[in-house]
Amino acid sequence: MSLPPEELARQTNEQRLGESRQEPLVSAPPGSVSVAKGSLSPDGRYRWDGRVWVPVPALLAPPKQQVFVSAGTAFKIGFFGFWGAAVASIVVWILAFIVLGACGAVIVGALRGSPSPP
């Protein structure tokens, strides 16, 4: 004897739901503080179903947003990025030349010293 299609579909759904339902990891200890049904644990990993703490499934991150850059914007970024780096490099070299020249002058002055009186 076979079951009617509605009953067969209901049993199949119940089996599928039973397989996907996660078993609780920790049950409430006796005499514990009452927690509202559906509330999250302090760490956000478990939800109280009224009887036991059930693990909350992990949420997936939203898809990354695509950024569109026009050719003009890309050119400006590349142009000023290149020339900005070039100018910064030249400024650093000029400052290094000045600082090293000053340090060299101080060292040469210290090595020559002042002539001692006779």
Image (cartoon, rainbow, N blue to C red):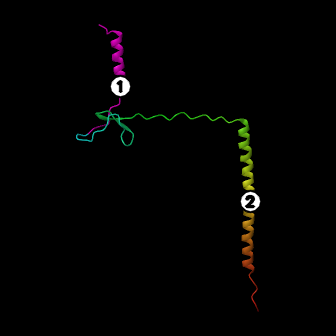
Q: Is residue 93 magenta?
A: no
Identify the amino acid type marked 1. Glu
- Given residues 44 and 92, the one toward you in this image is 44
Q: Which residue appears at 73% of the width and 42% of the height? A: 76
Q: Report helix, strand or loop for mark 1.
A: helix
Which residue position holds label 2? 93
Question: From the viewer's perspective, is 13 left or right of 73?
Answer: left
Residue farthest along the left direction in this orientation: 31
Residue labelled with disc 1: 19
Ranked by sequence position, the earlier of labels 1 and 2 is 1
Asked if 3 appears above or below 64 in the picture, the reply is above
The reply to whether the magenta stretch includes residue 11 is: yes
Compared with 70, 8 (above or below) is above
State the residue at coordinates (72%, 54%). 88
> Relative to 60, is 29 on the left or the right?
left
Q: Quadrant of the N terminus?
A: top left
**Residue at horizontal 45%, vertical 34%?**
59
**Seen in the image, is 63 located left or right of residue 78?**
left
Q: Secondary structure at mark 2?
A: helix
Residue 9 against residue 48 in the figure, above or below: above
Quadrant in the picture for the C terminus: bottom right
Q: Which residues are magenta?
A: 1-28
**Image position, residue 42 (x, y; %):** 37, 43
Q: Amino acid at mark 2?
A: Trp
Q: Quadrant of residue 90?
A: bottom right
Number of numbered callouts drawn: 2
Residue 66's tag is none
**Residue lying at the far bottom of the rendered structure:** 118
